[in-house]
């Protein structure tokens, strides 16, 4: 136990390790009037032994508790040593906005990668320590850093690609072989960087994925080792393959739309962004495939197509129907039944209708936007 405490102290001298407590209430379609009461209880990377023991005890209370969905626990932020406080602050600020807009879902951790291999390696090490502390079943051989990903490229780590390529992603760990379930939002220092306006919208986009996943209670079945065949993936996108047409389209629409409502954002912002995205539609229509048959390897930006598909559904129903009602029914009804109940027709019928509608000038398409 003493060795473990010393190990944690050494790690925390390298890493900014912040716990944020959320004191808020309400439902998934409520505003959180006291969202600004988030309070940092660890603000320095080097803390006293008593503070470290308190943090460790708090962590141990979370171990072996499989909690999922609507959630009012602690957001844990782990940042590499080369990540600035400003980077941490902007990430947390826009996660808080997502919680304010759409509700609190989790458990949730934020992992922020800097621009050096040394920082990413330190974060790799902390990742493994946190995971094994929270869940003794964690597979340290394959789900902690292994091999030599930073040198020869033969190996893997959770964060090594983020240094050069940038990253923004949500990973969900709700698995039948784990005792502790959680989401992580991973952000990095480039593409976009925290100094760019796009960074705010990307954080909202990723938090909406947390919201989506929070409405699916089924754990992944790890028996065949293929996440694509899991019931969670089937509910998320209505397919046994990962198709970004609906889940990514929803996250991108909500991230951009709710950003556009913020003070100081140009009144024409949302229309301009959607006009740019509409330039992809002609390429999609010329491709000839249904969007539900197109994956991330599409020869065009499938996110743009999915975003417009969501805009079209909203024009036929409402933003609340897509954001709230569909996801409330998703877990019990499944993807297709929830789609038909809330949108009035099958997904294939809606796609066919959308394809016909989308074949017109952009000046006409934007007329449906709020």
Image: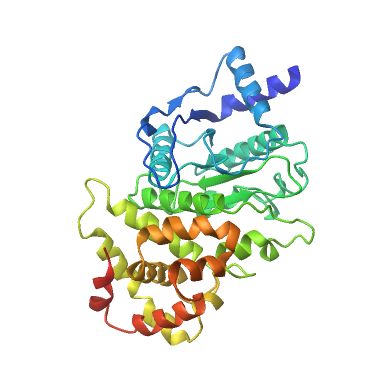
Please state the total of marks drawn on the protein image. Answer: 0
Q: Which residue is drawn at the image coordinates 59% and 67% (left, top)?
A: 242
Image quarter where the C terminus lies is bottom left
Please indicate whether residue 224 sits to the left or right of residue 342 in the image: right
Place of residue 297 in the rendered image (x, y in percent of width and height, measured from the top left): 55, 72
Depth check: 110 or 61 in front? 61
The answer to whether residue 121 is above or below residue 330 is above
The answer to whether residue 232 is above or below residue 94 is below
- Colouring style: rainbow
Image quarter where the N terminus lies is top right
Q: Which residue is drawn at the image coordinates 49% and 22% (left, top)?
A: 41
The answer to whether residue 336 is above or below residue 230 is below
Please indicate whether residue 344 sits to the left or right of residue 186 in the image: left
Residue 168 visible in the snapshot: no
Q: Which residue is drawn at the image coordinates 43% and 87% (left, top)?
A: 286
Place of residue 208 in the rendered image (x, y in percent of width and height, measured from the top left): 46, 52
Place of residue 345 in the rendered image (x, y in percent of width and height, measured from the top left): 47, 76
Residue 99 visible in the snapshot: yes
The answer to whether residue 104 is above or below residue 256 is above
Residue 303 sits in quarter: bottom left
Depth check: 165 or 41 in front? 41
Q: Which residue is drawn at the image coordinates 65% and 69% (left, top)?
A: 240
Residue 126 sits in quarter: top right
Place of residue 308 in the rendered image (x, y in percent of width and height, measured from the top left): 38, 70
């Amino acid at each position: 136990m003493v060795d473990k405490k010393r190990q944690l102290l050494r790690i925390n001298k390298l890493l900014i390790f912040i716990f944020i407590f959320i004191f808020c209430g309400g439902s998934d379609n409520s505003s959180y009037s006291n969202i600004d009461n988030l309070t940092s209880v660890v603000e320095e990377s080097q803390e006293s032994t008593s503070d470290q023991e308190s943090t460790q005890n708090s962590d141990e209370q979370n171990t072996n508790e499989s909690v999922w969905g609507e959630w009012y626990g602690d957001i844990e932020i782990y940042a590499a040593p080369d990540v600035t406080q400003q980077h941490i602050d902007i990430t947390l600020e826009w996660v808080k906005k997502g919680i304010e807009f759409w509700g609190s879902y989790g458990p949730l951790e934020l992992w922020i990668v800097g621009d050096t291999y040394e920082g990413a390696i330190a974060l790799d090490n902390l990742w493994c320590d946190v995971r094994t502390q929270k869940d003794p079943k964690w597979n340290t051989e394959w789900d902690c850093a292994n091999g030599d990903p930073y040198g020869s490229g033969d190996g893997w780590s959770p964060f090594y690609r983020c240094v050069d390529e940038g990253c923004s992603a949500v990973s969900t760990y709700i698995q039948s072989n784990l005792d502790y379930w959680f989401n992580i939002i991973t952000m990095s220092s480039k593409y976009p960087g925290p100094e760019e306006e796009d960074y705010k919208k990307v954080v909202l986009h990723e938090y909406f994925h947390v919201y989506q996943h929070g409405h699916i209670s089924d754990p992944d079945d790890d028996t065949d080792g293929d996440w694509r065949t899991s019931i969670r993936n089937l509910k998320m996108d209505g397919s046994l393959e990962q198709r970004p047409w609906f889940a990514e389209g929803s996250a991108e629409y909500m991230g951009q739309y709710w950003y556009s409502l913020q003070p100081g954002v140009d009144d024409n912002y949302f229309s301009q962004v959607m006009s740019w995205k509409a330039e992809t539609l002609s390429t999609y229509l010329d491709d000839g495939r249904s969007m539900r048959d197109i994956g991330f390897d599409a020869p065009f930006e499938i996110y743009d197509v999915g975003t417009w598909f969501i805009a079209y559904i909203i024009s036929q129903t409402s933003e609340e129907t897509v954001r709230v009602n569909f996801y409330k029914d998703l877990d019990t009804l499944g993807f297709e039944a929830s789609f038909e109940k809330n949108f009035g027709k099958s997904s294939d019928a809606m796609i066919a209708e959308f394809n016909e509608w989308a074949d017109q000038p952009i000046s006409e398409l934007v007329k449906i936007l709020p």
